[in-house]
Image (tube, rainbow, N blue to C red):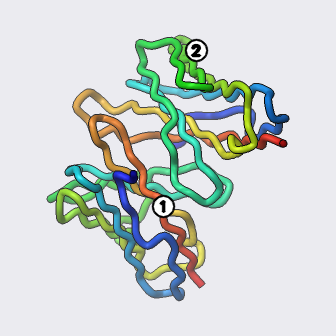
Amino acid sequence: SQQGEEDPQALSIQEGENATMNCSYKTSINNLQWYRQNSGRGLVHLILIRSNEREKHSGRLRVTLDTSKKSSSLLITASRAADTASYFCATDATPQGGSEKLVFGKGTKLTVNP
Amino acid sequence: GAVVSQHPSWVICKSGTSVKIECRSLDFQATTMFWYRQFPKQSLMLMATSNEGSKATYEQGVEKDKFLINHASLTLSTLTVTSAHPEDSSFYICSATRGRRPYFGEGSWLTVV
């Protein structure tokens, strides 16, 4: 079943602008992950944030996690046309010792215009 | 480089036939692999958990007799779509976990005509 809900569903910005995508989920989690998917391709893992972390950075990416609100955000700063893709959040709610199956959100389609 | 390999990348088959998709973990063993399906412009939906040496665990609503999963070795899981119908046309993607982090294959496009 779908756990995450991303918003917006689609986002169109100009190169150089920042892009913010949000994700909400329903159950307690071990971690939340963000993935990128170019059209018709596989998934690229961007960043993982654990349930006891509140913020994480990786290059131009900044992820926040608010477990009290069951929400996360992905910020891409100084966007580039090459950032155009769909972005998904995925939650891992596997009980400890489980097998890390992920539940994906619906995704945000980001278009960065040159 | 890729740590999970999926084959074929795309396949076209006729209605009523069966098609097999392979998922291999490269340079590591995976006792568990996951199969997802993604319809166009939609998100990934977990279909089943593939368990090495035992039966797969299917998600609710996924027909186990239609989507046969075999995980005969620690590096290979296969998904066979049996008696394929046009509505089975989709993007199928597998993942395997290494070091508690999932790695995804490049996916397989299935078109049933």
Residue nearest the viewer, comparing B88 with B103: B103
| Residue at x-position 39% and y-position 53% | B2
Viewport quadrant of the C terminus of chain A: top right
Residue at the disc numbered 2: A69
- Visible in this render: residue A85? yes
Residue B63 percent across, percent down from the top left? 41, 65
Image side of residue B61 versus residue A23, left or right: left
Q: Residue at x 17, y 62 (%)?
A: B73
**What residue does disc 1 label?**
B107
* Disc on res. B48: none
Chain where mark 1 sits: B
Dot 1 crowding, Cα within 10 Å, few <14, some 14–19, many 20+: many
Q: Amino acid at mark 2?
A: Lys
Q: Nearer the viewer, mark 1 or mark 2?
A: 1
Residue B49 in the image: above or below residue A19: below
Residue A19, x across and y down, in percent: 74, 28
Tell me if I can see residue B47 in this picture: no
Identify the amino acid type marked 1: Gly
Displayed quadrant of residue A101: top left
Does B23 sit left or right of A46 as displayed?
left
Q: Please, which chain is the residue tagged with disc 2 on?
A: A
- On the image, the x and y values in percent for residue A113 come to 83, 42
The residue sitting at 22% across, 50% down in the picture is B28
Front residue of this view, candidates A11 and A82: A82
Pointer 1 and pointer 2: residues touching (CB < 8 Å)? no
